[in-house]
Amino acid sequence: MRHTTTLILVLGLCAGTASGAGVATAAPGAEQQTCTGTSMTVMVKAAGKAARGWKVSLRTATPAVVASGSTAATGQVTLCAPAGRGGRPLVATAQRPGRPGVVLMSTAGTEGTPLGTVHVSDISTVATAFALNRFMSGTSVSGPSPGVDNAGLVVSNLVDPGSGHVGWVVANPPNGADTTTLATLRTLANTVATCSGGSKDQCNAFFTAARPPRGPKPDSIPTTLQAIARNPWHNAKGIYALPRTSTYAPGLTSQPTAWVLSLKYVGAGFDAPGRMAFDAQGNSWTGNNWRPPGNSGGLSLVGLDPAGQPLAGSPYRGGGMQGVGFGTAVSPITGHIFTASYGLGRISEFLPDGTPVSPSGGYTQGNLSKPQGIAFDQKGNLWIPNFGNDTLTVYLNANPNTAINVTGTSASPIKKPFGIAIDAQGRAWITNNSTSGGAGWVLPATLNADNSITLGTPVRGGGIRSPQGISVDSAGNLFTANLLSASITRVTPSGQARAWRVKGMKGPWGTAVDGNDTVWVADFLGATLVQFCGRRVRYCPPGVRTGEPITPVGGYANGALQHVTAVQVDPSGNVWVANNWSTGSPLSQPVGGDGLVQYVGLAAPVKTPLAGPPVRP
């Protein structure tokens, strides 16, 4: 059920000269002024009622105020959005008179395409603050592209700024009643409404309950929501216990363990997606492991924009791609997308528009055999572990005709290599003995100036058993996901290995590190997302040390997750996981998973494409 909002008459593009000049009213009764951009009607509601006399400001992501005015008795004001270019978000804020902390907000289109109508309300404030929390300073929004631009797009999945209704994506399957996100969004909006339409004491209770474990008490509604978005596990019980209106219904019927908003995307057709990779614009690329019916090799590469919508022409086929498992990567040099076809031993290459570059039989140069995880180093070399024949292949400059192959030795064995990560020196680290019941290890490999490869000393112990995915932080620490020991192993730059465990984690498959060096884990058997405190403990709850869990028992689960393999972080700070196997089928006869799940604004942003350790944009 959508929240009902009063519709208002909208002025379109300002009439007048060919340049778009016209007349727009800044506030009721104010002197008419010439508008050289777009006339924008802003409707403000607090606790479901028209907000009279509120100061409305239109801001760019610079951040600069480009228009302002006060609402009439109807809660309406007409502003002039100046002509602009590009996709940076416009944000409308509305402040209650005499109450500096009572501020509501909404995106208002982009600098290049302002909306003609914008609804600012409690629920739009929740959606905007969560999606843009990594780019907020007080009630202002700013940050680098494409992160801040893409975060603005995600807002519309949660709420439609033009109508005031909840967004189509969050309101309908595979979201809607199938997950807890819509109910969580409404519950938070009802809590905000007790402040926006209530007393100072009610606002103070809200600000106090959401006070972050590190830092001062928030002083406004947006900063309070920002604190909740960044610390979703903190005082979940206390926030849920706050008084709420019934403006937005239905909401949650029981206390959540964490205040997270996540969205599931299934557009363009997914069947057992294994691992996603992001390009420089924040688009996600994912190969399908299977194709229906059954589990024969998938033939499609799915490209989604940062808001989870299929890119033009997606899904893409050709280039010899068939049955992509854990191997998808984007070149940091060319932006081309590469996939590894596990069953056929092929590498496929696609242009950024999805056009296949590799031949119909794929690239088979080098000693390829059942390649799994692939990764680019900082120079654009493609590293390929060959699970099927215990070797490693490197395509220099991603050119298959320059293939270099290396076989392990007794001192530096390669056996069932699976995942790979690149450190700051360009050295590759490969997980070995994947899916084996015995102990595994992590093996370093260095590409020398003469294009030879030197294998280093394997790192063993620390709970490494059937290691799958691997990632690296900014200090060179490695993190393996150990499927059979239900643990994460941290390997320090000096080679010390130590297991990280958390109650309830059953069998992790993938790891990722965000811009704060926080560690994220896709728990395959547990069908959930787990967060660990990384080396920078100032980003962790007080008293939580490196290697200890941040998520509550059970992780961040909301009904959208299946058996997840990969986890990655995008430039907006969204955490994505891949539903590889359905939880409704036995592991002996698996059915392919059906999409990607995006946790909105949950992590510190990462520059993409990823090549080496994570770097903040």
Image: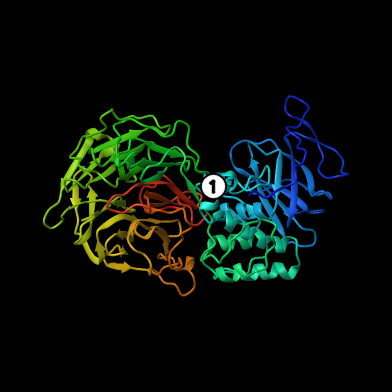
The answer to which of 432 and 581 lies nearer the viewer is: 581
The answer to which of 177 and 35 lies nearer the viewer is: 177
Q: Secondary structure at mark 1?
A: loop
* Residue 101 seen anywhere in this rendered image of the structure: no
Name the residue at 69% across, 70% down: 204
Residue at far bottom of view? 543
Q: Is residue 209 left or right of 201 when viewed as pictured?
A: left
Name the residue at 25% across, 34% down: 400
Task: Please identify the quarter of the rendering in which residue 129 is found.
Answer: bottom right
Q: Residue 359: x percent and y percent? A: 28, 28
Q: Which residue is mark 1?
A: 144
Name the residue at 35% across, 43% down: 329
Q: Amino acid at mark 1?
A: Pro
Mark 1: few/some/many CA within 10 Å (<14, 14-19, 20+)? some
Task: Please identify the quarter of the rendering in which residue 117 is found.
Answer: top right
Q: Is residue 193 left or right of 180 when viewed as pictured?
A: right
The answer to which of 580 and 278 lies nearer the viewer is: 580
Q: Is residue 172 above or below residue 37?
A: below
Q: Residue 589: x percent and y percent? A: 29, 50
